[in-house]
Image (cartoon, rainbow, N blue to C red):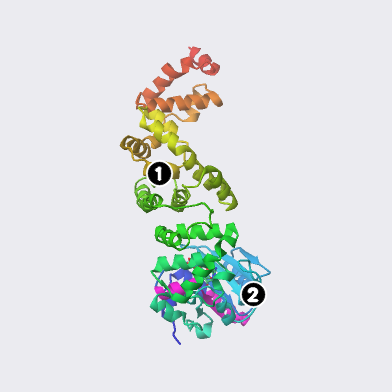
Amino acid sequence: MENLADKLNREPPEVLRSIKLISGIAEELGYPVYAVGGFVRDIILGVEDFDLDVVVEGDGINLTRELSRRLKVGWTAHIRFKTATIHIPGEVRIKLDVATARREIYDLPAALPKVNFGSIKDDLKRRDFTINAMALDISRDSFGELVDFFDGRKDLRDKVLRVMHDLSFIDDPTRILRAVRFEQRFDFYIEPRTLKLLKESLSKGMLEKVHNHRLRDELILILKEPDPVKSLRRINKLRGFKFIHPSLAVDEKTFALLKRVDELYQWFAGNFVHKHKHKVERWLLYLIVLLENLSMVKLKRTLQSFAFHKKDIQKVISFKKDTAKVVSKLKKEISISGIHKILFPLSYEVVLLMLLKSGDGRVKRKIQNFLRVYSGIQIHLRGDELKELGLRPGPDFKLILKELLDAKLDGKFSTREEELLYLKNEILPDSAAIPAFRQESKKP
Ligand code: CTP
């Protein structure tokens, strides 16, 4: 039997420390304990993974309770399934899932299974692919021994994805999307029988039977892969995106845009993130493009039924709703403050994608200048300095700040002194709603 203690001992210190602690507690409680699933696969592949899945032949909740007491961190439990989750703080944040070894019985296709408790072998047997169905014994006296009942080690060496049994994709059709994700991520090969089962399950419409919230989670995982376009192409070829919406067609034009998203993201991340403190969600850029061919009504319905976060939904809709209008405004002669007024209220994801979408050099330059320069321009005077001038906070106050910013954007002044003069001479005298200032300025 292969022993991977050496590899385990080379894990980052935080991970190793957690594993050793779990191992000690499990020994005290008399439970055999294993690392399982993706963590084992990744250790063999030499890929860093801070999601640690542990299975005990005992009571997973008991073990987690003790672990949390010693680490002094909170935990959450799923009492019925006897599973628990702990986030272990440190230089790297480790997500630890502890489960009680179980058997699963699927009464209904695509629904969640019934659970009985069982052995580690039962627990591994219910999993998706052989490469994810290995365990690493982390019990003290057999530390590092690979538990491989289903030849996962061989499949991993041969780069083969193989389901554990013929009903795997029927029991849990999200595994179709997982298969594509792993195939593309690792450059693995879906062996012929597995591919046949996958295609059969697709043609039975199994993916469409899955609850949209689960599909959403899988879709996001795909979009977060280093190269999601490979997986999207593969899905498109296998069945297309009917599982998102029956009329969603992703054509070559859309794929051409999808292919450029990463370059766009890297350009932004490399040049602008620190300056603007804006975090652009890369996966969301992909989602917005992927869904671009849906009509507004279908788009809204889809986003709602998948229950994406409200702020993400707004961004997808804003791209659909605002792009044509914004691009046509930016084609015209327009002041810098005008550009700012149009682009500033939009999210950076939407602005970036407008840049990607627009073929017009004038529009592109305006958007790039906005990102590079205009979006970072601020006035010198702060709110409390304006209050000292006798201005009272309120709607007018905001209008004055905006007017001042517009003037600065349009190059009417640059230094602090010039700004103050401009405020006093050009803005305040016309601002009828500022009695306080007039009183102030009448003072000798
Ligand atoms: N699993 C499964 N069927 C699923 C989801 C998960 O059998 N539909 C099992 C697999 O054994 C998997 C483990 O649960 O390895 C953990 O799942 P998860 O954390 O979602 O995936 P990982 O395999 O760790 O993959 P990733 O690297 O993408 O996190």
Residue at 52%, 21% (x, y): give it.
390
Residue at 49%, 57% (x, y): give it.
241
In front of the other: label 1 or label 2?
Answer: 2
- At label 2, the amino acid type is Ile
Q: Position of residue 174 (x, y in %)?
A: 54, 65
Q: Looking at this rendering, what residue extends furthest in the bottom direction? A: 1
Q: Position of residue 333 (x, y in %)?
A: 35, 27
Q: Is residue 30 magenta?
A: yes
Q: Position of residue 84 (x, y in %)?
A: 61, 68
Taking depth in this image into account, of 441 and 100 the one nearest to the observer is 100
Q: Where is 381 relative to 314, above or below?
A: above
Q: How many marks?
A: 2
Q: What residue span does the magenta drawing correspond to? A: 20-45
Q: Is residue 56 magenta?
A: no
Q: Where is 243 relative to 200, above or below?
A: above
Instruction: Using the image, tell me which numbered label, if any, was put on residue 352.
Output: 1
Q: Looking at this rendering, what residue extends furthest in the right direction? A: 80
From the viewer's perspective, tell me whether residue 292 is left or right of residue 81. left
Which one is earlier in the sequence, the residue at label 1 or at label 2?
Answer: 2
Distance (Cα) linking label 1 and label 2: 47 Å
Instruction: Using the image, tell me which numbered label, if any, was put on residue 431.
Output: none
From the viewer's perspective, tell me whether residue 412 is left or right of residue 76. left
From the viewer's perspective, tell me whether residue 304 is left or right of residue 93. right
Judging by the rendered image, the residue that carries numbered circle 2 is 105
Q: Where is 86 relative to 62, above or below?
A: above
- At label 1, the amino acid type is Leu
Q: Position of residue 93 (x, y in %)?
A: 49, 62
Tell me, yes or no, if residue 39 can be seen here.
Answer: no
**In the structure shown, which secondary structural element does the residue marked by tag 2 occupy?**
strand
Tell me, yes or no, if residue 385 can be seen here.
Answer: yes
Classify mark 1: residues with Cα within 10 Å, few (<14), some (14-19) or many (20+): many
